[in-house]
Image: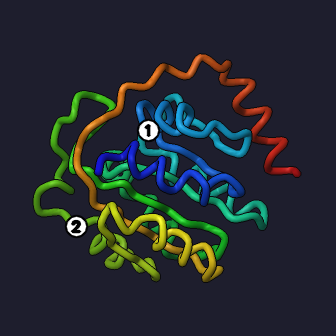
Amino acid sequence: MIRSEILKEIAPILRDQLVVCNIGIPSQELHAIDDQPSNFYMLGTMGLASSIGFGLALAQPKPVIVIDGDGSILTNMGTLPTIANNVTDNYILMIIDNGSYGSTGDQPTYAGRKTSLAKVAEACGCENVIECRDVDTGPVLQKALDSGKMHILVVKCDSGNAKMPVITMDPVIIRDRFMKAVQA
């Protein structure tokens, strides 16, 4: 499976949650598959979806799911020890590990070679770290949500992007409708 197929599978699970989605093509895919006001689409700032989502989880009680990529996590490795040392049980970081920088041309990442992001997260002190196969994402994500505990999910999948349109919604509208969803 590629990332867009995973997003299609988990869209019903995401629908009732606050979601912060990684930059570029992942946001375009989620937007095209199931646009929701509770989805915050990152249009820039590679590597910061995990940090922005974590801050949101610390600031309010609703569950927050961050959809991030292996390339973005590798770009901002400091986020994992921060998450590990400031546990908030309404936070799930789902790292879609396709072994490539998907939004910039599928250049390989080190996660596609020797670096295990699950082991890195555990070494940083993160608890409830689960590495799963793409086909198991839906049940693993639902179980993590049902547990009421913070989780780091590393979803191993194939590299590849679906052809999706660019998000034409004004970033201010994305922000404002997401803020309303947070306050609802």
User: Residue type at mark 2?
Assistant: Ser
Residue 95, relative to residue 127: is it above or below? above
Q: Nearer the viewer, residue 27 or 11?
A: 11
Name which residue lies at 58% across and 36% down.
41
Q: Nearer the viewer, residue 97 or 172?
A: 97
Q: CA distance from mark 1 to mark 2?
A: 21 Å
Q: Nearer the viewer, residue 166 or 49?
A: 166
Instruction: Return the x and y of residue 134 as percentages of the image width and height.
Output: 33, 61
Circle 2 residue: 116
Name which residue lies at 56% across and 51% down.
11
Instruction: Return the x and y of residue 81 as percentages of the image width and height.
Output: 44, 69
Name which residue lies at 79% across and 42% down.
179
Query: Marks 1 and 2: CB-CB under 8 Å?
Result: no
Answer with the quarter of the image where residue 172 lies. Answer: top right
Residue 86 visible? The answer is: no
Answer left or right for 159 relative to 167.
left
Instruction: Return the x and y of residue 137 as percentages of the image width and height.
Output: 42, 65
Indicate the secondary structure of the residue bearing disc 1. helix
Is disc 1 surrounded by few (<14), some (14 to 19) or many (20+) residues within 10 Å? many
The first of marks 1 and 2 along the sequence is: 1
Indicate the secondary structure of the residue bearing disc 2. loop
Query: Which numbered tag is attached to residue 26?
Result: 1
Please tell me whether mark 1 or mark 2 is closer to you in this view. 1
Is disc 2 surrounded by few (<14), some (14 to 19) or many (20+) residues within 10 Å? some
Number of numbered discs on residues? 2
Residue 150, relative to residue 99: is it above or below? below
Instruction: Return the x and y of residue 14 as percentages of the image width and height.
Output: 61, 55
